[in-house]
Image (spheres, helix red, strand yellow):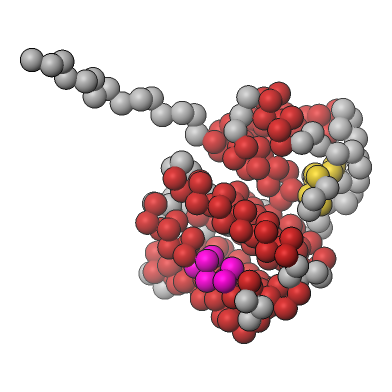
């Protein structure tokens, strides 16, 4: 009788958020110590991956956190640079301002006004390069879902690339000031981050991306309003309001 293959599950790898946080701390220390002075360029993704032994997803998560904190800024096609001292965004919605569902709903109302218009402008002004990086952010989102991650970094990157595609730096500066807190699903106890939920978000992103690709400003504006509006309503239902 043939031997039955062992059904012992393979141990799960360390969760990327923990690895990303360690990487954030290591890079922040280099900035604070002067090893990476203001204006200097961070090592490339490949160099950071090789030095720290982490995946590209972890590197991008860490870079998103550094950018959200105002410590660095990423220039598309050029790299990530350390901000000059005092150059961090003066306006931020920090974690302590997102401790309740009411706080999150208020932040989403701000995003609807800001990002619906950004999507419309992106549809009118986007370049082929903008479209390319938006599609890459969607691909990263898909990869995160398949890997069992929360896709926060890819989600934030998708919205940031829309802001950049407006060709108006104030939109990306504002979103950068808000930081990764604009993707609040990991902040609240009981927040749904299931695969089915993330697939729904992915589909909403697809609608926004399709409208931007077709240069349909009204459709892009509406798709973004629907996307963020659904997020707001999900949280209103959680709060019982």
Name the side, left or right, on which 194 lies relative to 142: left
Report the quarter where the N terminus lies: top left
Q: Residue at x 85, y 42 (%)?
A: 82
Name the side, left or right, on which 8 lies relative to 201: left
The quarter of the picture where residue 48 lies is: top right
- Range shown magenta: 204-210
- Residue 205 magenta-highlighted: yes
Instruction: Return the residue found at the far left.
Output: 1
Q: Main secondary structure of the magenta part?
A: helix
Q: Residue at x 62, y 53 (%)?
A: 136
Q: Residue at x 80, y 50 (%)?
A: 77
Q: In the image shown, does 75 or 14 lie closer to the viewer? A: 75
In the rendering, at what x and y percent does residue 159 appear? 64, 62
In the rendering, at what x and y percent does residue 79 appear? 81, 45
The quarter of the picture where residue 241 lies is: bottom left
Q: Is residue 25 visible?
A: no
Q: Residue at x 67, y 30 (%)?
A: 49
- Residue 113 magenta-highlighted: no
Q: Is residue 141 above or below residue 214?
A: above
């Amino acid at each position: 009788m043939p031997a039955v293959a062992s059904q012992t599950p393979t141990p799960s790898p360390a969760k990327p958020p923990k690895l990303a946080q360690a990487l954030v701390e290591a890079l922040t220390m280099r900035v604070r110590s002067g090893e990476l002075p203001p204006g200097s360029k961070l090592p490339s993704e490949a160099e950071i991956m090789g030095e720290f032994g982490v995946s590209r997803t972890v590197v991008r998560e860490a870079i998103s956190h550094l950018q959200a904190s105002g410590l660095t800024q990423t220039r598309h096609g050029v790299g990530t640079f350390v901000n000059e001292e005092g150059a961090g965004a003066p306006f931020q919605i920090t974690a302590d301002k997102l401790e309740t569902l009411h706080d999150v709903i208020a932040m989403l109302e701000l995003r609807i006004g800001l990002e619906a218009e950004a999507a419309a402008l992106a549809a009118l002004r986007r370049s082929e390069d903008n479209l390319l990086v938006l599609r890459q952010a969607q691909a990263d989102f898909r990869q995160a879902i398949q890997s069992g991650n929360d896709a926060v970094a890819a989600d934030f990157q998708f919205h940031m690339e829309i802001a950049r595609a407006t060709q108006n730096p104030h939109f990306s500066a504002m979103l950068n000031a808000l930081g990764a807190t604009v993707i609040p699903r990991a902040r609240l106890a009981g927040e749904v981050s299931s695969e089915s939920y993330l697939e729904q978000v992915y589909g909403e992103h697809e609608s926004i991306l399709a409208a931007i690709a077709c240069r349909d400003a009204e459709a892009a504006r509406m798709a973004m309003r629907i996307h963020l509006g659904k997020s707001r309503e999900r949280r209103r239902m959680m709060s019982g309001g």
